[in-house]
């Protein structure tokens, strides 16, 4: 969380469900949750002004949403400079990633690289940029006890090696990300008109 200088932080809990983060404003599509605001999380913009929040949490939410890039742009718009965006999501090798039919995306620990400096040549997908504060991978208990989780999280090159060659055997469970938005809010993009050819 960003420093608050004694002031109360404004936190947005996106897809808060029934366990809203204490002291936060919760938004969710489901009216039987603890949400303060009911809205479709796939429709943008969310009903808040630019740079309203000091921090945003999206805990096991982004895998359910239709457009990851547009969602990250919305998170970028809502969080103040110096603020924090925290995302938690299953690793795609965990059974929970595929056993839930509402999951639309199956992600790994490099899935958000397009928003940072190390975008692999694909930074043109969006103007929304984030500084990566940390990435933490949780492995299944057996592999954690053997020390693989420590290696994956301590050494970025080992994490890349694990994603490329080992993760189908040494399976991941979940991932935690924390980002800081960089630069001004990205203007809302209009969807391109679909051209039809006969």
Image (cartoon, helix red, strand yellow):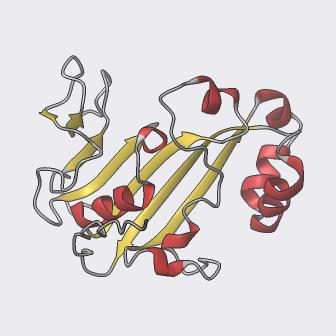
Q: Quadrant of the N terminus?
A: bottom left
Position of residue 71 in the picture relative to residue 107 (left or right): left
Image quadrant of residue 180? bottom left
Between residues 153 and 107, which one lies in front from this camera angle? 107
Decide if residue 1 is in sight here.
no
Between residues 147 and 27, which one lies in front from this camera angle? 27
Image quadrant of residue 59? top left
The image position of residue 177, as x and y in percent, is 52, 54
- Residue at 27% x, 75% y is 186
Decide if residue 195 is in sight here.
yes
- Residue at 65% x, 78% y is 120
Position of residue 37 in the picture relative to residue 195 (left or right): left
- Residue at 24% x, 74% y is 185
Position of residue 156 in the picture relative to residue 41 (left or right): right
In the rendered image, the residue lying farthest to the front is: 198
Please tell me whether residue 166 is drawn above or below residue 18 in the rendered image.
below
Image quadrant of residue 154? bottom right
The image position of residue 133, as x and y in percent, is 51, 65
Please tell me whether residue 171 is drawn above or below residue 115 in the rendered image.
above
Please tell me whether residue 77 is drawn above or below residue 138 in the rendered image.
below
Between residues 93 and 42, which one lies in front from this camera angle? 42
Q: Quadrant of the C terminus?
A: bottom left
Position of residue 160 in the picture relative to residue 94 (left or right): right
Please tell me whether residue 101 is drawn above or below residue 12 in the rendered image.
above
The image position of residue 67, as x and y in percent, is 41, 53
Number of dots carrying numbers: 0
- Residue at 15% x, 66% y is 50
The image position of residue 46, as x and y in percent, is 18, 51
């Amino acid at each position: 969380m960003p420093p608050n200088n004694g002031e109360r932080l404004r936190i947005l809990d996106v897809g808060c469900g029934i366990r809203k983060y204490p002291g936060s404003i919760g938004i969710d599509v489901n009216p039987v949750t603890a949400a303060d605001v009911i809205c479709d999380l796939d429709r943008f913009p969310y009903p808040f002004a630019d740079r309203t929040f000091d921090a945003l949490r999206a805990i096991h939410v982004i895998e359910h949403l239709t457009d990851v890039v547009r969602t990250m742009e919305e998170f970028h718009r809502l969080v103040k400079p110096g603020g924090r965006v925290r995302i938690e999501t299953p690793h795609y090798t965990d059974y929970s990633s595929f056993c839930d039919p509402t999951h639309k995306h199956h992600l790994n620990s490099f899935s958000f690289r397009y928003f940072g400096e190390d975008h692999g040549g694909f930074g043109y997908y969006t103007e929304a940029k984030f500084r990566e504060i940390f990435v933490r991978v949780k492995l299944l208990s057996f592999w954690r006890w053997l020390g693989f989780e420590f290696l994956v999280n301590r050494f970025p090159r080992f994490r890349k090696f694990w994603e490329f060659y080992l993760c189908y055997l040494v399976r991941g469970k979940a991932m935690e990300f924390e980002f800081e938005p960089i630069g001004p809010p990205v203007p809302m993009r209009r969807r391109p008109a679909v051209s039809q050819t006969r």
